[in-house]
Amino acid sequence: MVLRSLTQGPLVVASHNKGKVREIEALLSQYGLAIKTASELDLPEPEETGLTFEDNAALKALAAAQTSGLPALADDSGLVVDALDGDPGIYSARWAGPDKDFSLAMRNIEEKLAQAGALSADARSARFVAVLCLAWPDGHVEFFRGEVEGTMVWPPRGKAGFGYDPVFQPEGFDVTFGEMTSEEKHGWTHGDDAALSHRSRAFKLFATACLKPKAS
């Protein structure tokens, strides 16, 4: 597949999740692109019927691109817990219910880990996965996948970030994503080799392939 460069905006951030939009906009800020959000354009939120992160990211990105007539970037991401056979995975948001109650979702995961006897740190391995899909109105799509390994902790720690961040401690750190600033969580700017979060790792691949930093 030939990758297309994204040299000018606007680019649609195809998400209705305020936390994701905030993080993606922060990552995009160094490129000088004009950005529109799905909410700003009043785009419908497609049903996520895919069976993989790639499927669902493509559903959202294509729907936004074809409705708006603009290139669109969508994220599908989730928490994969080994002791729970990969759950909640692509259903991570659904575990929070219609009210998006992630406190409830985190308690549910902890209860299931206890039922599985996953009490020690080495039995509580998990990873965050993020897939970014860049879609164009003509149906062209490109995918960028990032993952970060870590351990599930309890009780939740920190109020930064969103979703499951307070119960996920990334490998090599003694704090959770919920205890990190946005800059610490992402751990990457254009030209750096390092990237910490799953979303910033996916974004690094996307940016390296498709974007150029704005002139200083």
Image (spheres, helix red, strand yellow):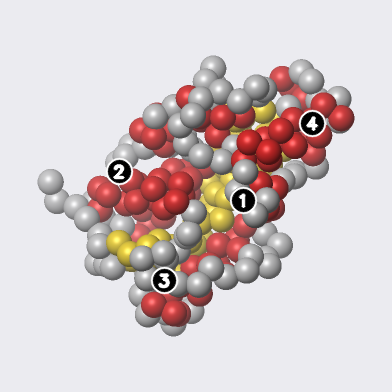
Q: Secondary structure at mark 1?
A: loop
Q: Secondary structure at mark 3?
A: loop
Within-10-Å neighbours for mark 3: few <14, some 14–19, many 20+: few
Q: Secondary structure at mark 2?
A: loop
Residue at 61 percent across and 29 percent down: it is 167
Residue at 40 percent across and 46 percent down: it is 23
Residue at 61 percent across and 25 percent down: it is 156
Q: What is the spatial separation of the Cα atoms under label 4 and label 1, in whole angstroms?
A: 20 Å
Tell me the kind of residue under disc 4.
Glu
Q: Nearer the viewer, residue 98 or 209?
A: 98
Q: Is residue 90 above or below residue 82?
A: below
Q: Secondary structure at mark 4?
A: helix
The x and y percentages for residue 78 are 62, 47
Q: What is the spatial separation of the Cα atoms under label 3 and label 1, in whole angstroms?
A: 20 Å
Q: What is the spatial separation of the Cα atoms under label 3 and label 4, in whole angstroms?
A: 38 Å
Q: Is residue 16 above or below residue 64?
A: above
The single residue placed furthest to the left in the displayed view is 216
Q: Which residue is mark 2?
A: 190
The numbered dot on residue 111 is 4
Which label's residue is closer to the chain start, 3 or 1? 3
Which label's residue is closer to the chain start, 4 or 1? 1
Q: Is residue 28 above or below residue 13?
A: above
Q: What is the spatial separation of the Cα atoms under label 1 and label 2, in whole angstroms?
A: 36 Å
Q: Which residue is mark 3?
A: 42
Residue at 66 percent across and 46 percent down: it is 96
Tell me the kind of residue under disc 2.
His
The x and y percentages for residue 48 are 64, 65
Q: Nearer the viewer, mark 2 or mark 3?
A: 3
